Amino acid sequence: MLAKVKVGIIGCGNISHQYIQNMKTFDILDVKSVSDIDMEKADKIAAEYDLKSVSADELYSDPEIQIVVNLTIPSSHTDISIKTIEAGKSIYNEKPLAISRADAGRILEAAHKKGVLVGSAPDNFLGGSLQTCRKLIDDSWIGTPVAATAFFATHGPEDWHPNPAFYYEIGAGPLFDLGPYSLTALVSLFGPARRVTGSARISFPERSILSQPLYGEIIKVDVPTHVAGVIDFVSGPVASIIASFDIRYANQPLIEIYGAEGTLSLPGPNKFAGSVLMRRIGAEHWSEVPLTHTTTVGRGIGVADMAYALTSGRKHRASGELAFHVLDLMHAIIEASDRGEHVMVESGYCEGKPFERPTPIPVGLRPQELDM
């Protein structure tokens, strides 16, 4: 029988419900307590899911908690990560890992010295669709990958989010909010990138909130709201991405992978399951590929994978190093736009060699089960 790894959550906003519900489906996880700067929110979540509501300091000092899941806004990620690490606990952040490269580096360095793990969303690449795509690519079903496209375009969160202003602050925007889904998916399939370029703009300097309870309030926009990037991967493929809060309607494929002998068309990179379509040389039509993996739960699978890593000693997949590389790519795209040139990406290498892709999840596991 698996030894359960106890988890505490800091941040009880909208996304906390998905994390708690999904993490409770994993035998290896035991969600114990929740905390928030607004303790009324923590009390409400705790009552709904039969958890303990505690202060952040109480959570840090609880000797049973091994993993802290940080669901706060991006500007709080570094401070909470460092405090968690200093308390001797592993940290799993919502995206992005941190706002700046320097802060992300501080988190990784502190964790290395303390001997704890760092992980970060998004973990959608561990779901059934992208793991199936990974296997198809690795088994050469479409031949050598040569290119990819990734589109993630909406009209912004002010249409639905109850308090959307932070999406337009430094550390957010479509690239830092939506981009990690596409970039993490592509890095998991192709490995690290070596060079990027891009263009970015603020299309509308102010946005009107259209959701309740702040309907009609005006948001000042501090970050680019439409970003287009081109990424050269160490392994060869060239990918084009769009991340936008400025597009009303679109009919673009969400992710497509183009190989020498065929193409894969995938559901959105923020999905854990969905149809994978393939068309190979000589085929007259697209065919839906049965998913090879059944681990298709939502947010929190990365936390479970970290728990397995803590238990067995293997590497975890939604790692801090992966998240740092994605953060580096996002900053490089913006820098390329500002400077009007390609930007080389140094984080894709370790001691002169490309860092390794996360290992694929083995075929044949039960839902909500991961490998030791």
Image: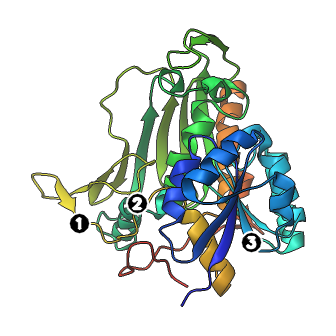
Q: Residue at x 9, y 52 (%)?
A: 284
- Residue type at mark 2? Leu
Whether residue 2 sits left or right of residue 5 in the image: it is left
Up-down relation of residue 78 to residue 334 (above or below): below
Picture coordinates of residue 134, whole percent (x, y):
41, 66
Secondary element type, mark 1: loop
Picture coordinates of residue 4, whole percent (x, y):
62, 79
Tell me if mark 1 has few (under 14), some (14-19) or many (20+) residues whose alpha carbon lies within 10 angstroms of its own.
few
Whether residue 367 sits left or right of residue 340 in the image: it is left
Q: Nearer the viewer, mark 3 or mark 2?
A: 3
- Tell me, yes or no, whether the two marked residues, 1 and 2, touch with CB atoms within 8 Å: no
Q: Which mark is residue 102?
A: none
Residue designated by label 2: 130
Q: Which mark is residue 290?
A: 1
Up-down relation of residue 360 to residue 126 (above or below): below
Q: Residue at x 62, y 45 (%)?
A: 44
Nearer-N-terminus badge (3/2): 3
Q: Residue at x 49, y 54 (%)?
A: 185
Picture coordinates of residue 322, whole percent (x, y):
65, 60
- Residue type at mark 1? Pro
- Residue type at mark 3? Gln
Tell me if mark 3 has few (under 14), some (14-19) or many (20+) residues whose alpha carbon lies within 10 angstroms of its own.
many
Based on the displayed image, in which of its 4 quarters is residue 277 positioned?
A: bottom left
Secondary element type, mark 2: helix
Residue designated by label 3: 66
Q: CA distance from mark 1 to mark 2?
A: 12 Å
On the question of residue 354 being in view, the answer is no
- In this rendered view, identify the residue nearer to me: 196 or 156: 156
Whether residue 243 sits left or right of residue 334 in the image: it is left
